[in-house]
Amino acid sequence: MQPGGIEPVLVHDPEMGMTYIPHSPKERDEMLATVGVKKLEDLFTGVPAKLRFPKLDLPPALSEMEAAAELSEISLGNENIRTELVSFLGAGAYNHYIPAAVGHILQRGEYYTAYTPYQPEISQGTLQAIFEYQSLIAALTGMEVSNASHYDGATAVAEAVNMADAQWRGKRKKVILSPALQPQYRQTLRTYLQYSDMELVGDDPHADLNASTDQMEYLIDEMTALVIVQYPDFFGRVYDFSHLIEMAHGKGALVCVVANPTALGLLKTPGEMGADMVVGEAQPLGIPLSFGGPYLGYFATRKQFLHKMAGRLVGETVDNRGQRAYVLTLTAREQHIKRERATSNICTNQGLLTLAASVYLSLLGKKGFRQVAELCYQKAHYTASQISKIKGYSLCFDTPFFHEFSVCCPRPVAAINAHLIEHGFIGGYDLGQDYPSLKDHMLLAVTEMNTKDEIDALVEVLSEVPHD
Amino acid sequence: MNIPTNLRYSKTDEWYDPASGKIGLTDYAQSQLSDIVFVEIVVNKGDSIETGKQVASVESVKAAADSYAPVTGKVAEVNENLSGNPETLNKDPYGEGWMAKIEGGDAGGLMDSTAYTKYCEEREH
């Protein structure tokens, strides 16, 4: 041992067996003395006494076999959309078919790490997959550059605000949010920006939801840093934002379009409309629905904003033998180098999920992806037209929609959904939760996964809902 | 190391030309940063700036740095060509790589080329 070095000790704890602990008892005592407490337990006095060392009333330990049997019995109580239930719920996460090869490729040992490797250039395959993901997202959104992803759609939107803030360097502080931006995204924005002086306006829950884009144009002024709209919006409606974007640019403001990637298989791209940033949730691209994720935030922008964009970025180059090679590039703009002056303090990415999105899009191809979007569109429109024929139900908006639409219901949404679940359907999102004016309004999503029989059965059950 | 005798230098490696009022990054600074890939001048023509205030943000392939005003004065001009050609800072730091022109600057608190040469040499060790 080196003089003054640290000697790791093997501690024998009768409960735990042999445990490797890198700190010697002497070192622990020194640390406790330095912070001014006598024993380790004193560090936890901030926790209420009754919670500090609770007696955990656990059942006797089980063998692995017994535990597996018990857990599998508990899991039988789950109902899910792969087996029993038919889902018409969307509101930000969507049930799409995932080709079997996606899962197979994801689980290859070469890829099965969710992180950008710390010695990135040695993992050419991982970098190539990220580069292809970036290229696919750029093509899909009609933008020039995409980063290597964020945690989810909500945090990608927050990074759009960070980028606008970095771009304006404090000169403009106002961010206008469409009231038809996903409510949870707006909540996430407020969490992210609670200690920032960026001001979020425009999403008053009492705003006239029929006139949202016109109202937004009225709000844009010389202090507006960024305007955020959703495409299709939270109610499923499709607007061409070209005019809004032109108006915003006229005032010098940037515009971020939060887009559903599946819709981009069919609709005009936000890039064509002139958007400065296109961000959103890429879960529909080959990532299964799951409670709490992990999901995938995508972020695309124009070349002129490249240096202000957060996140990792993979570039293509040639090595010293003239062979094509991939590198992490422009890393000096990221927080591990630029520290507090960086656009964002996050530069991690969802490596495995970007791979899922790349594999999904590659397997479907340009034509197949468009077919998915067309099926979603047609099935949703069939569903909407059938539902609007039921007495007591009507479509809330007459704006064109993609695969999601808002329905005015004859009874509270919770009651209708309780009835639907008894018949094996997960009903729509209760819009009254977020919009007081949309009490008894349900947001329904239809994808290629919903068969005509299922749609007809849904319509049947909805028409049975008692009209008392 | 190129350290022209007609210029004055700051401890944060900016140069100031008392004759023209131009400011920029020194040859020492650009060589420490290596290949510069991004420059953003964060002051505008007409701004009043003080010594030590940020003038530009610079990123190279391996590092990021801010560049500060070596003198107090008014921004008479900024070099618009830099953002599209950041490599100019590496190639010609005292010529085409100038960042801004400051009116009314005073070189009083700055080092001359002899002092700056010594200052750079000290940091080499």
Image (cartoon, helix red, strand yellow):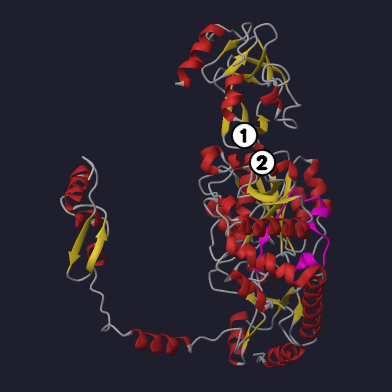
The kind of residue tagged 2 is His
Q: Secondary structure at mark 1?
A: strand
Quadrant occupied by the N terminus of chain A: top left
The part of the chain drawn in magenta is A262-283
The amino acid beneath tag 1 is: Glu
Q: Nearer the viewer, residue A274 or A16?
A: A16
| Quarter-of-image position of residue B77 | top right
Q: Residues within 10 Å of mark 2 (few under 14, many from 20)?
A: many
Q: What subunit carries mark 1?
A: B
Where A42 falls versus B23 (above or below)?
A: below
Looking at the picture, how far across and down is residue A300, in whole percent?
A: 70, 53
In the rendered structure, the answer to whether residue A449 lies left or right of residue A5 reads: right
Residue at 48% from the left image edge and 89% from the top image edge: A76
Gap in Å between the C-alphas at discs 2 and 1? Answer: 9 Å
Mark 1 residue crowding within 10 angstroms, few (<14) / some (14–19) / many (20+): many
Q: Quadrant of the C terminus of chain A?
A: bottom right
Image coords of residue B72 (percent x, y): 59, 14
Callout 2: chain? A
Instruction: Please indicate whether residue A136 sits to the left or right of residue A104 in the image.
Output: right
For residue A276: magenta? yes
Q: State which mark lies toward you, 2 or 1.
A: 1
Is A410 on the left-hand or right-hand side of A111? right
Q: Which residue is mark 2?
A: A307
**Residue beneath the point at 54% across and 86% down:** A79
Q: Which residue is mark 1?
A: B59
**Residue closer to the observer: A302 or B59:** B59
For mark 2, give the secondary structure: helix
Q: Position of residue A319 (x, y in %)?
A: 67, 45
Residue A455 visible in this rendered orientation of the protein: yes
x then y, percent, for residue A396:
75, 73
